[in-house]
Each structure stands twice: as C-alpha cells, then as structure tokens.
Image: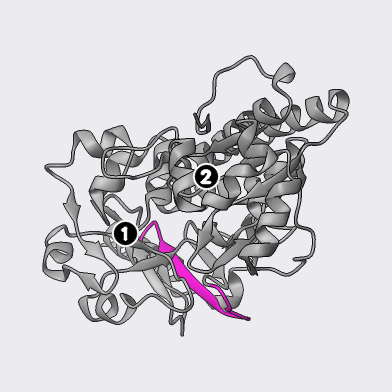
Amino acid sequence: MKIGKNLSLLLLLALTLAGCNNKSSKLTDFNRSVYTPEYASGFDIKGADSKQSVLLTVTNPWQGADGIAVQLFIARDGETAPEGFDGQVLEGDADRIVAMSSTHIAMLDAVGEVGRVVGVSGIDYISNPDVQARRESIGDVGYEGNVNYELLLSLDPDLVLLYGVNGASGMEPKLRELGIPFMYVGDYLEESPLGKAEWMVALSEVVGCRSEGEKVFAEIPVRYNALKQRVAENALDAPSVMLNMPYGDSWFMPSAGSYAVRLIEDAGGDYIYKKNTGNASTPVDMEEAYLLASAADLWLNVGMASTLGEVKAACPKFADTRCFRNGYVYNNNARTNAAGGNDYFESGVVHPELVLRDLIKIFHPELVEEDFVYYKRLK
C-alpha cells in the first residue's frame, strides 16, 4: 500500500510539473534575443527562458507603415501562445507553405527547404527549377485580388507567406476566417542588399532550421564584402550610371540610398542622379532624363528590353546619347523564362554578391573573370 501511495504521489507530481511546463507564458517573457539581424531592419526573433517556442516580429511590413508590428508565435514542444497574444500562431514547424512571392521561394531554396512549398502565385513566372519540376503537384493560387481560396484551402497549408505593398494584404481577412496562419515577409522594403538576403534566416526559423539559415547567410556578407574591398583597392575611376526606362510621361529615378544605388556604389560606379535623398523613387520629366542619360557613361536596367533596337523603339531620342552610341547599355534580364519571369528579382535577392560581381564586371571588367549571371550587354 505504501509503494502504491508513493507511486501515486510521484505521478501527481509529474503531472503537476508537466502542467507548469506547458502553462501559457506572458508575452513579456519573450524578451531573450534568439536572432537579431545585422543588416535587415524588418524582423527579429525572440525567445523566453526554458521555452522552445519563439516569437517572430515583423516591423512595418509595407510601404508607409509606421510603428506597425505583425507577430508570429511558433509554438513548439507542446507549448501554447502567451496569454493575451493576438497575433498569428504556427503550431510547430511549417511543413506545407504557400508562397505569394518568388523571393520567398528563393529564400527557402537557399536553405534547402523549397520542397515545403505546396502553393505559389503565378507559377509560370517562377524560375526555381524545383518548383518547375513539381509544377503538376503545386497549386497556383492566383494573385491578390483574385485568389482561389478553394484551391488554397485544399493545399492544407501550415503557413501562407504574404507581402504588403501600400497597406495590409487583402488576403488577411479571408485567411483569418479560414484559420490559416500567415506571416509577412518584408524583404523588398530593405534597401541594404545584404539586408534583403538576411530574411532567409526568418524563413529558416519557420521551417525549423534557423541554424542552417544562419550558416548559409553568414557566408554571403563575406563574399560580398571581399568583392567590395577588391573594388576599393583597385578601381580608380567611377563611371557615371543612368538607370531605368520611362513609365508613361515620367522617368522614375531611385533615391541615393536605394538598393540599386547601393549596389552601384559598392561596385565602383557613380549614380548620376543625386537630387533624390528621400526614401522612394521620384519622377523626372523626359527632358531631364535625356540630359542625365546624355551625361552618363553607362545605362542600366532598361525595363524589359533585350536589344538596343527595343530601347530605341521605346525612347527614340535617347539613341543619340553617348552611352547608347557606344553600346554601353546593360540589362538585368539575362535569366528570363518564356513567360517573362526574371530570376534577377527571384534568386538575385539571396545572391547579392553575384549581382555585385556582375556590376563590377560592367564598371571595371579587369577585376572580374567570371561570366555574367544576371546582367547582359545589349546589342
């Protein structure tokens, strides 16, 4: 009888301890840094003492957002979300993912987990070979504003990866109604090339392989900064660079601190338009654009054009600029598929070192032996 009583007491104690272990935490308990980005500004990952779960916070996930934080609680080891938590809850690691942007696919591919993607938006425009090889079994749920929610639900996703443009995604209300967790990915808002790539760590967390994501990402700044240093040590003259093509009656010029301009500067180029010091592209009229192009040594990122003839057809007057006459016009569409999907905007986001190397080859060809990856010279 005494042995039985002792066993009962031990069992009661074990159940009590188990109950304490799984008791809901407070949100304030999640104050221990699990991962703080070095380059990205839009996310962080926090944990709590003696807990396996983590809290992933995405800050200002769309243009114009101010002081907005969207949180995803990844519940692990039988733990529950903190008391009063009103964000999204992912139960365990995400095995089945719907990705609404091709950059999400590139990030998962970078950490070896693209096989978890079961749904996409616009499969014809995606370059990833694994997704294309599995296209018969991957659901194309359509685009925001015309999403096939019946198909999306049939895919049984653990998580939907979203992005916002000028506000919250229009998919939010329906996903809440269906009970499907979602997470915003704000890579496109990062102006730092390395900051964009660092979002792969956030995605590696949701699939349970953050250590691998950290390892993969850690090698990228090493390669990027080595190329940047090569330019700093060897390049003397910085060629002036014109960007983009007209949109309607305006020509949009990026800000001096933008992603594209940072790459140009790191590659030893000189962005020709320095008036825009804001945080968004600004329109200039066609006459000012012509004067800028006339003064530039090189012209990059010319829309969808693949030949000099297409550039001339789009803006005939610019055919007499020095950069056009000399054939110094380059575009980032060397890896474009049949539907027009451009891998520069997909895998280029997680390989800023390869984009940088392409630009160095354009500006200072004596410093790079390798062939172009994303860029090509138009003929």
Residue 178 location, x and y as percent?
A: 21, 76
The residue tagged 2 is 349
Report x, y in % for residue 120: 26, 53
Establish if 140 lies above or below 325: below
Residue 261 location (% of width, % of height): 70, 50
Q: Which amino acid, mark 1?
A: Leu
In which quadrant of the rendered view does residue 141 lie?
bottom left
Query: Splitting the image into 4 quarters, where does residue 146 fall?
Result: bottom left
Looking at the rendered structure, which numbered label has been put on residue 26? none
Q: Secondary structure at mark 2?
A: helix
Residue 111 shows in this picture: no
- Sequence-wise, the earlier of marks 2 and 1 is 1
- 311 left or right, relative to 260: left
Q: Is residue 261 magenta?
A: no
Give the total of numbered labels.
2
Range covered by the magenta-colored residues:
63-78
As drawn, the label of residue 7 is: 1
Q: Nearer the viewer, mark 2 or mark 1?
A: 2
* Residue 67 inside the magenta-drawn segment: yes
